[in-house]
């Protein structure tokens, strides 16, 4: 699996750990090993601009996910894959927002970035949390993926 990461946020973060948790989540979810993912870390101003432009939101958010190709998920033997590399999409993270949320939640900024990376990956795979049932499913899966990643470290 090809995962590109670029830190343009101006904040020092452990990009290796972000890559590792993203790879773990996508592997556990059965994503095609030829899939490609991009992770971009940005500053608050740029995240606010992206949030406004693409989501209609005001101010910065913590994570945005821009899916590109739903064909990269291995749905099992009933659906044949093309075997070609698929562009999964982009995850955009705002470390400064993550740091504030981490302080409020009582854990480290790194832990928050790991959580947001998995959250973004699940959005790329079609999960959402708009409805209570969807939220329960997505957040339970997110927690399971984070726990299994932490256990394997």
Image (cartoon, grey):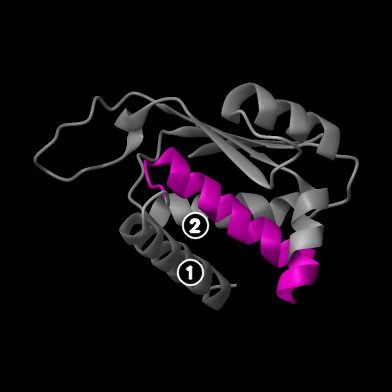
Q: Position of residue 11 (x, y in %)?
A: 88, 47
Q: Which residues are magenta?
A: 102-128
Q: Residue 119 or 133: which is nearer the viewer?
A: 133
Q: Position of residue 56 (x, y in %)?
A: 61, 28
- The residue that mark 2 highlights is 24
Secondary-structure class at tag 2: helix
Q: Do we see residue 62 in this rendering?
A: yes
Q: Do we see residue 20 in this rendering?
A: no
Sort mark 2 into few (<14), some (14-19) or many (20+) by Cα contacts within 10 Å.
Answer: some
**Was residue 20 drawn as part of the magenta stretch in this picture?**
no
Q: Is residue 54 left or right of residue 147?
A: right
Q: Position of residue 39 (x, y in %)?
A: 64, 37
Q: Position of residue 16 (x, y in %)?
A: 71, 53
- The residue that mark 1 highlights is 143
- Residue at the image point whose x is 33% and y is 23% from the top: 84
Q: Is residue 31 left or right of residue 68?
A: left
């Amino acid at each position: 699996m090809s995962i590109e990461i670029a830190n343009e946020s101006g904040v020092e973060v452990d990009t290796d750990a972000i890559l590792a948790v993203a790879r773990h989540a996508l592997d556990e979810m059965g994503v095609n090993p030829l899939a490609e993912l991009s992770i971009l870390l940005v500053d608050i101003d740029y995240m606010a601009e992206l949030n406004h432009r693409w989501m209609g939101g005001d101010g910065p958010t913590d994570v945005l996910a821009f899916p590109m190709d739903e064909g990269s998920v291995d749905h099992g033997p009933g659906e044949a894959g093309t075997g070609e590399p698929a562009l999964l999409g982009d995850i955009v993270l705002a470390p400064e927002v993550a740091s504030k949320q981490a302080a409020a939640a009582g854990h480290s900024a790194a832990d928050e970035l790991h959580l947001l990376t998995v959250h973004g990956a699940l959005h790329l795979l079609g999960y959402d949390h708009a409805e209570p049932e969807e939220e329960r499913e997505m957040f339970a899966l997110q927690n399971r993926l984070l726990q299994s990643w932490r256990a394997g470290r």
